[in-house]
């Protein structure tokens, strides 16, 4: 390496740092060597370098959004066994993974008994949304109700509302009977009503539809919430039938 090359490399790295292009900084020499070996021209070299910077930026941004969403674990659809859950409409899930429903502010309702993969699917859809550049937040409903009640006491409810208002997707996990506190039910209703046509909701519940009338402790509130939730809504059902199927298969194997 000649003296001038060394000097220009040092300067280049300094400038890349000032411009906040860390991947280009880290990769420029390696890509330059590879391009020289491949006889690639200058523009091809620049393209490769810029592409790497972009890819790394998007990966980091998705990681940040995923962290901000506060999913309980990180399970995607690749870990979801659709054959074990035949009631789940797989083509619909694949379509929802593209995130187009978010542009249309549509909701997703996941209904089924406990332990049948509702939270798993809600998380998978939420993570896909993060990867697509959307702002997502995951809450268990009880946790959200506690959070908003506390925010109200500390007079930061407005700030919480503003934070929620910036979302593209709010996941409400385990909507069941909202107990005792009338204030809690009203604040939860307020979240659902505010989300309506502003951002999408994914709601999971193990309540069958016939038991929905009293979710919020008041038929009027529940009816109004349901109207908004289901106005433009995709429904995914997880049923237990699969367990019987799995069980039957297991027994067959044991017998055979
Ligand atoms: P729910 O929210 O309906 O109560 P979860 O999503 O918490 O159920 O699922 C319970 C556990 O079973 C989780 O660890 C989940 O990953 C797993 N699980 C459920 N259904 C499937 C499936 N079809 N494929 C892979 N894992 C599954
Ligand atoms: Mg769950």
Image (spheres, grey):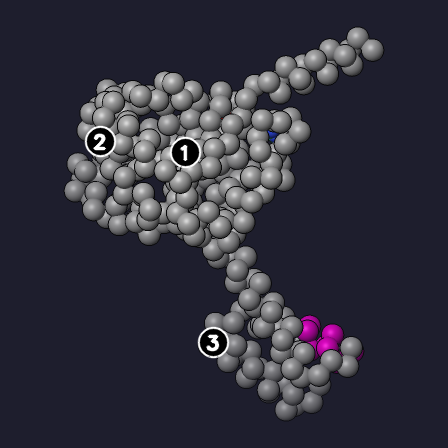
Q: Is residue 8 left or right of residue 177?
A: right
Question: Quick check: marks 1 and 2 in contact, CB under 8 Å?
Answer: no
Question: Quick check: marks 1 and 3 in contact, CB under 8 Å?
Answer: no
The image shows residue 239, relative to residue 73, as above or below, that is above
- Residue 72 vs residue 12, the one in the foreground: 72
| Residue 36 quadrant | bottom right
The image shows residue 218, relative to residue 66, as above or below, that is above
Mark 3 to mark 2: distance in Å?
Answer: 49 Å
- The structure residue drawn at horizontal position 20% and vertical position 25%, both measured from the top left corner, is 182
Look at the numbered disc 2 and give the secondary structure of its residue.
helix
- The structure residue drawn at horizontal position 63% and vertical position 32%, both measured from the top left corner, is 82
Mark earlier in primary sequence (1, 2): 2
Residue that label 2 marks: 186
**Residue segment shown in magenta:** 30-37
Q: Label 2 neighbourhood size at 10 Å, few (<14), some (14-19), many (20+)? A: some
| Residue 187 quadrant | top left
Residue that label 1 marks: 203
Query: From this viewpoint, is residue 82 visible?
Result: yes
The numbered disc on residue 19 is 3
Query: From this viewpoint, is residue 74 visible?
Result: no
Question: Quick check: marks 3 and 2 in contact, CB under 8 Å?
Answer: no
| Residue 202 quadrant | top left
Q: Label 1 neighbourhood size at 10 Å, few (<14), some (14-19), many (20+)? A: many
């Amino acid at each position: 390496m000649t003296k001038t090359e060394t000097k220009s490399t040092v300067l280049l790295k300094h400038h890349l740092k000032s411009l906040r292009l860390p991947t280009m900084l880290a990769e420029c020499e390696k890509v330059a060597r590879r391009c020289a070996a491949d006889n690639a021209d200058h523009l091809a070299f620049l393209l490769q370098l810029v592409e790497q910077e972009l890819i790394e930026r998007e990966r980091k941004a998705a990681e940040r959004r995923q962290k901000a969403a506060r999913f309980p674990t990180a399970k995607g659809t690749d870990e979801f066994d659709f054959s074990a859950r035949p009631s789940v409409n797989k083509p619909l899930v694949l379509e929802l993974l593209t995130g187009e429903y978010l542009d249309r502010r549509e909701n997703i309702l996941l209904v089924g008994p406990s332990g049948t993969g509702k939270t798993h699917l809600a998380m998978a859809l939420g993570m896909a949304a993060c990867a697509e550049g959307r702002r997502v937040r995951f809450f268990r409903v009880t946790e959200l109700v506690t959070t908003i009640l506390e925010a109200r006491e500390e007079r930061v409810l407005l700030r919480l509302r503003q934070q929620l208002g910036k979302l593209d997707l709010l996941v409400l996990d385990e909507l069941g009977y909202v107990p005792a506190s009338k204030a809690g039910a009203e604040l939860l209703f307020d979240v659902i009503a505010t989300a309506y046509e502003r951002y999408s909701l994914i709601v999971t519940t193990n309540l069958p539809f016939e038991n929905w009338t009293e979710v919020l402790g008041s038929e009027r509130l529940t009816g109004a919430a349901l109207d908004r939730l289901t106005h433009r809504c995709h429904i995914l059902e997880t049923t237990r039938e699969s367990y019987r199927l799995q069980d039957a298969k297991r027994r067959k194997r044991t017998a055979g």
